[in-house]
Amino acid sequence: MAKILYVDDEHDIREVAQMSLELDPDFEVRSVASGAAALAEARDWQPDLIMLDVMMPEMDGPETKRRLQAEPATAAIPVVFITARTQPHEVEELRVLGAVAVIPKPFDPMTLAASVRAHLPRG
């Protein structure tokens, strides 16, 4: 069972993403609404992969990723960014931060789980 943490400040998108990911019977999915909640959930739950919205109030996705990397308990968890900003230079900036992938918003709910599966660490 792969544990996926989905982080997005928009309730509707979180709900659609969680339902989409849960179509895969091998995924256990939790979702939170902020970078701060993501840090706590990641530390306590130890997901196999974190899906992180780029644009969030207070602590955006890139800052959340930096803080995850700075903490030994969460530094090794792979991060996939979810963003509407998909210009090549924007995607490259996210990859430089250590993202294993960037999935464009709006995402296709029918293929989201397969996209995520492709980026899970091989166990």
Image (spheres, grey):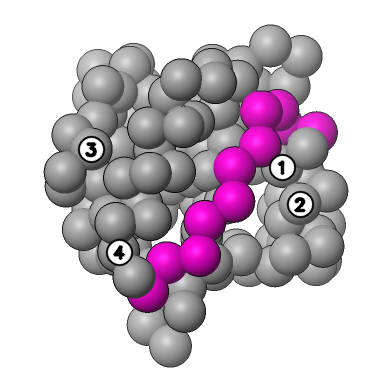
Question: Which residue is drawn at the image coordinates 50% and 65% (left, top)?
Answer: 28
Mark before the other along the chain sequence, 1 or 4: 4
Mark before the other along the chain sequence, 1 or 3: 1
Residue topped by disc 1: 38
Residue 84, given in percent of the width and then of the height, sits at 33, 17
The answer to whether the residues at label 2 and label 1 have Cβ atoms under 8 Å apart is: yes
Residue topped by disc 4: 24
Residue 93, given in percent of the width and then of the height, sits at 43, 30
CA neighbours of label 4 inside 10 A, class few (<14), some (14 to 19), many (20+): some
Cα distance in 3D space between marks 3 and 4: 12 Å
Cα distance in 3D space between marks 4 and 2: 21 Å
Q: Quadrant of the C terminus?
A: bottom left
Indicate whether 105 appears above or below 19: above
Occupied quadrant, residue 46: bottom right
Give the mark toward the camera: 4 or 2.
4
Amino acid residing under circle 4? Asp
Residue 65, given in percent of the width and then of the height, sits at 64, 41
Question: Which residue is drawn at the image coordinates 38% and 44% (left, top)?
Answer: 19
Residue 60, given in percent of the width and then of the height, sits at 64, 22
| SS for callout 4 | loop
Cα distance in 3D space between marks 3 and 2: 24 Å
Amino acid residing under circle 1? Ala
Mark before the other along the chain sequence, 3 or 4: 4
Amino acid residing under circle 3? Pro
Cα distance in 3D space between marks 1 and 4: 22 Å
Amino acid residing under circle 2? Glu
> Start and end of the magenta stretch?
26-36
CA neighbours of label 1 inside 10 A, class few (<14), some (14 to 19), many (20+): many
Q: Visible in this render: residue 97?
A: no
